[in-house]
Image (cartoon, grey):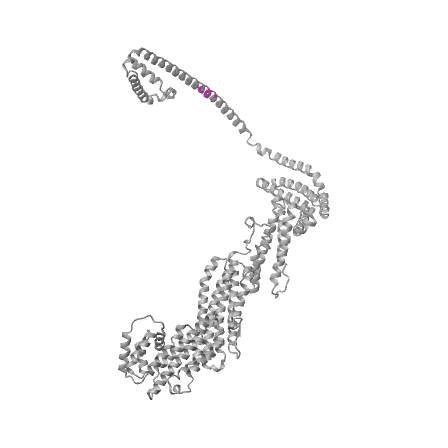
Amino acid sequence: MFLEVLWTTEVLETPSSVLSLYEKLPGVMKSYVDSLSRLEEIARRNAEKRIVEAFQKSESLENIDVIRTRFLSHKTATEAQLKMAVHGQLDSIQNGLDKLESALGISKACAGRISEMENSLSTISNLPSSLSQLHVISTKHKQLVAAIENMSYLVKVPDAMVEAKKYIENDNLLEAHKRIQELEGIRDEIMSDVFKQNSSADLDTLRTFFKGLDELNAAILEKIKRVGATLTSAVVTQNVLCVNCIRIIDREERADMIWKKRQGKGGFMPDGRPKEWKAKFFAELTRIIQDRVQGCSVDSENEKTRLVRHNEAIRQHALRDLRIAKNICPVYFPPDYEIFDRFVEIYHDAIGMHIENLINEGLNDTEIVQLLGWINAYHTEEFMKHPLFNVDFSRLNIKYPPNLLPEDKLMSLRQEYVKKTITKLNGWLVKSLAIDVEDWKRLTKPELNDASNYYTPLSLMVLSPVNELVGEGKLLHFLGNVVRESFLVQCTQEITRFSRDYESSIRSYRNLYLNDRAQFPYYIEYILANANNTLTIANSFAAVINREVENDAHLKGRLLPQLGRLKEEYGKVAALCLNCAEETVFLDLTSVISAVLTREWLSPGDLTVQCLTGTLLDYNETLVHVHQTYYQDLMPRLATHLLIDYLRTLLTRTLNFTSVHERHTAGEKLIQSAEILKAFFENKIPVSPKIYDAYNAIGLIGRFLTNDDRGMLSLDVGRLQQSFPDVRTDQIYAILMLRGDVRSNDAQELAINVTQGAKATNPTSDIFTKLALAMSR
């Protein structure tokens, strides 16, 4: 029984929503039988569980009556709650049924009344046709009533128009506009009513009657446009009139807005609306500014400074008007007009259109420069970046880009300028070179500079156009960085290409000289001057460019390799000039050297070595006028060249000595010549000890001839081998054969034996190596 009590309690504690659903839906009771069975089973298990928990301890059995009483009390309370819930649900159901029954009665009553109305309306189906005439009469009555109401106004219309006209003539625009608005109000309301009746004839009658309004509007608009045309002066001299015009424009703008909204509802828009007087006001201001920009060109078409004066006039007009727009106009214009920004937009687009027209008409080189410079100066403090203006182009509504031209057109203009400038530079270089080439043929020496170096005007002529364009404050800075960078790159390339033309001209000059030396008495002087020119052109041009790009890392990195190549190319031209100078010297020395080891040379009065030194001294007086760098390179070359030619003569000349004395005399003369030449180059000509010490080779060869004991020749060969380790076997053989008393086999054997037995040492001179190379050519 105790288990039954617990089970009943568990069932009673089942959620009331489930029980209420069970009671509310008796029609589906069967579907919940299984659910109740499951709930009953769950309640039994829970009851068993609670009993087990309650009697886990043996002492709990003593309190079984207390536990049973507690569970019975709990059961009683739960049953009471369940009964209250059931009664509450039943009351709600009863109220719902009562309301449904009341609604059913009302709906039946409405259905009956609707049926009665349908029966009543079916009897008057012909009523609309019977009342159509009454409708027409009613409409006419409304029109007549409206006409009577407006009659008092219509009668006054002509007088009001005359009055408004007088006000306009007296510049009393506010009063005139007030009358016009009153007349337009009458007209628009009447026409709106007529429009609804779709009577086009009546609308035409009203248009004819109010025709004078169009003339009044045109007259007052003309006044407003005149103020717009003279706005910058009007705000100063006629500020009251200016303010009145702005007030009238604002009134009309509001009226336009109102009628646009009404048109969306009724479809009617009064004649002349929207007036858009604000747009027309600014259109007139735009036209005047455009005419002013275009009208600044009053100079002669052929005047070189025409465009400069034109652009300066535009700048002055613009600055004056923008100052007024910035300082005075905001006092009289509402903030929403943004009057200063409008001025900037108008001037910007007018200038952009003007520049576009100039480009379409075609510009010469000078005008392109002037225009690019002006465009570049447009965004400086001298114009739009003036501190007073503080123009922000990003918030302006402009047709043309901030730079006045689209980037492609601006770049095309820049490229055209650079292309034409480089073409002119090329023409200038060709012309300058042609003039200089003619100067090379003169019968006077070239001039000397402060360093006592020969030069011709060519270097100055080459650098002249570059110096005019490049440098702080020069034209390229005026034209902007894009033009500057493009020009510097192409100019460097052009000056580099010019070196090839320069080299070609020097080669042609050399050929002419070799054909007829007498025709060019100062050939070597001009050759040296051209060598100096190459150094001046390369270094001066590089210095100009380096100064220009000193603070531009990007451009500097781009130009430095090109400048290096330029110096290399002009270095080649300088090398050609030095070769020509060396060639010229040896045109005179070769004939002197050829006398060595001849019968004439053996005579006591022979002055071969004196001729050599004298000729070199004479040439040295000319050669010192080449740049020190080249001089220090040229003189050692001449000394080495002379020694090689002298040695080659000794090794290739065969002189049959008639006696030992004659051979001995030749040897002593060689020893003496070696001493004279060595002393000459040591004291008179600036060459290194290595070079003048190499002249000892001539004296050592002379010892071969002075040695009377052929058995001692090995010592002479060893001495030569020791002094000049680079001497070759064939060269020693040729020296031995020079004596004329040594058999070929003996000379060859001696040369080989001494050469093979020589210890390898670091040679202090490579003169015999150079001799072998020269003889192999």
Q: Is 630 above or below relative to 9? A: below
Q: Is 527 above or below relative to 548? A: below
Looking at the rendered structure, the number of numbered marks drawn on it comes to: 0
Q: Provide the major secondary structure of the magenta segment.
A: helix
Q: Residue furthest bottom?
A: 658
Question: Residue 153: x percent and y percent?
Answer: 70, 39
Nearest to the observer: residue 543 or residue 559 = 543
Q: Is 515 above or below relative to 559? A: below
Location of residue 777 by image quarter: bottom left
Specify whether 690 is left or right of 352.
left
Query: Does the rendering let one see residue 429?
Result: yes
Question: Residue 34: x percent and y percent?
Answer: 31, 22
Residue range in magenta is 96-102
Question: Residue 341: x percent and y percent?
Answer: 59, 49
Q: Which quadrant of the rendered structure holds the N terminus?
A: top left
Location of residue 647 by image quarter: bottom left
Is 347 in the magenta? no
**Residue in view at x 49 percent, y 81 percent:** 519
Specify whether 384 is left or right of 163.
left
Nearest to the observer: residue 513 or residue 313 = 513
Question: Residue 140: x percent and y percent?
Answer: 64, 37
Query: Does the rendering let one see residue 656?
Result: no
Location of residue 48 by image quarter: top left
